[in-house]
Amino acid sequence: MQMPRSVLCLFLLLGAVGALTAQPAPILTGWDRVRISPMKTSIYVGSVSLTTEVFGRNGSNLVSTYDAKVWPWFFWGETGKISITLSDANLASLARGERAEFTGTATNHKNKPRTVTGYAQPADAISGKIKVRIGVDDTVLIFNGTYRFETAMK
């Protein structure tokens, strides 16, 4: 039995409209961990290296610990906790290959707060470059590195 062309065109049109309005599943929804490479920045007559453990996803936050070492003034180094807010909208931007800005907080081992801002620029679906600015007293340290999304081992 042959379907009239008008009915066939209507089904094709409805299918096309449905495909255009459907929200694609974000590519990054399955990633619950983010690994950020160790980073380093220069300061007046010295440098600061920043390393973090793998960030774990907790809602819209990525949470980890950090270790900042200051050379040659080792006594200025600190450890603490860091949290970056990366919403589902930010993840969708990254999945589309767009830059995503973030904010966050850090607290050092002496319970002193730090401000965190920055952005992630994807290179592909699961990795890219990251710029992190950390406010330390009246100074802002700027770190450049790379990130990679991972899934947790089960």
Image (cartoon, grey):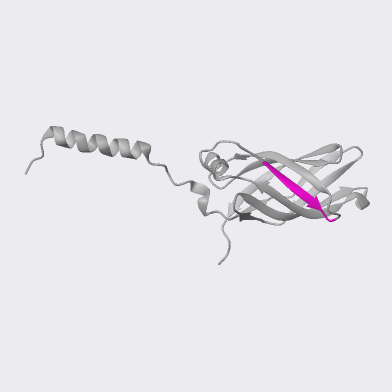
Q: Which residue is found at the position 67% from the left and 56% from the top? A: 54
66 or 123: nearer the eye? Answer: 66
Relative side of 86 to 9, left or right: right
* Spot occupied by residue 30 in the image (x, y as percentages of width and height): 51, 54
The answer to whether residue 133 of the structure is visible from this angle is yes
Q: Which residue is found at the position 70% from the left and 50% from the top? A: 83
* Spot occupied by residue 113 in the image (x, y as percentages of width and height): 81, 47
Span highlighted in magenta in the image: 103-109
**107 part of magenta stretch:** yes
Whether residue 14 is situated above or below residue 82 in the rendered picture: above
Residue 136 placement: quadrant: top right
Type of secondary structure dominating the magenta stretch = strand
Whether residue 6 is situated above or below residue 144 in the rendered picture: above
50 or 3: nearer the eye? Answer: 3
- As drawn, which residue projects farthest toward the left? 1
Quadrant (top left/top right/bottom left/bottom right) for the N terminus: top left
* Spot occupied by residue 118 in the image (x, y as percentages of width and height): 69, 39
Relative side of 150 to 51, left or right: left
* Spot occupied by residue 98 in the image (x, y as percentages of width and height): 56, 36
**44 part of magenta stretch:** no
- As drawn, which residue projects farthest toward the bottom? 154
Q: Which residue is found at the position 25% from the left and 34% from the top? A: 13
Quadrant (top left/top right/bottom left/bottom right) for the C terminus: bottom right
The answer to whether residue 132 of the structure is visible from this angle is no
Report the number of discs.
Answer: 0
Residue 48 placement: quadrant: top right
